[in-house]
Amino acid sequence: MMRETMIISLIGVSLSACADQRDRYQTGIREPISLRDDGDECGSTLVQTYVGLRANQTVREEVTRRSGASVIRWIDPGMAVTEDFSPARLNAELDSDGVVTRIRCG
């Protein structure tokens, strides 16, 4: 009886320690990305969450604001674009339905 009580007590202590540890790190809020990756002059790493979304006016405004890019090119399928590389320019490639398929500097 004494041994069973001790085992149950130890299990209870272990479980409560795990719960306390887990709760300490769960905030329920995703931390915003505040810094660009090294070499990301156009801010493409800040807006990768928009890949897969339709590029409506709201998405375009948010990409512009969040990336901080000085120039943004919205590239439709088959659209002629220059091949010069500009590290500060953000390229957002769209599919035929206007959905963002890729975001990159260039």
Image (cartoon, rainbow, N blue to C red):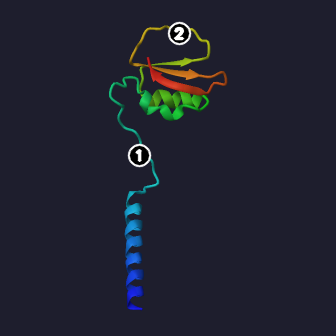
Tell me what residue is drawn at x 38 percent, y 72 percent.
14
Structural crowding at the residue carrying mark 2, measured as other residues with C-alpha within 10 Å and reported as few (<14), some (14–19) or many (≥20)? few
Note whether 53 is above or below 94 in the view shown: below
Question: Which residue position is annotated with label 2?
Answer: 81
Note whether 31 is above or below 61 in the view shown: below
77 sits left or right of 41 in the view? right
Could you tell me the amino acid type at mark 2?
Val
Note whether 71 is above or below 54 in the view shown: above
Position of residue 81 measured from the top left corner of the image (x, y, whole percent) = 53, 9
SS at badge 1:
loop
Position of residue 20 measured from the top left corner of the image (x, y, whole percent) = 38, 66
Task: Identify the residue at the far left of this view.
Answer: 38
Question: Which residue position is annotated with label 1?
Answer: 31
Structural crowding at the residue carrying mark 1, measured as other residues with C-alpha within 10 Å and reported as few (<14), some (14–19) or many (≥20)? few
Tell me what residue is drawn at x 61 percent, y 12 percent.
78
Position of residue 46 measured from the top left corner of the image (x, y, whole percent) = 43, 32
Q: CA distance from mark 2 to mark 1?
A: 36 Å
Tell me what residue is drawn at x 66 percent, y 21 percent.
96
The quarter of the picture where residue 36 lies is top left
Position of residue 10 measured from the top left corner of the image (x, y, whole percent) = 37, 78
- Quadrant occupied by the N terminus: bottom left
- Quadrant occupied by the C terminus: top left
Ranked by sequence position, the earlier of labels 2 and 1 is 1
Tell me what residue is drawn at x 41 percent, y 42 percent.
32
Could you tell me the amino acid type at mark 1?
Glu
SS at badge 2:
loop
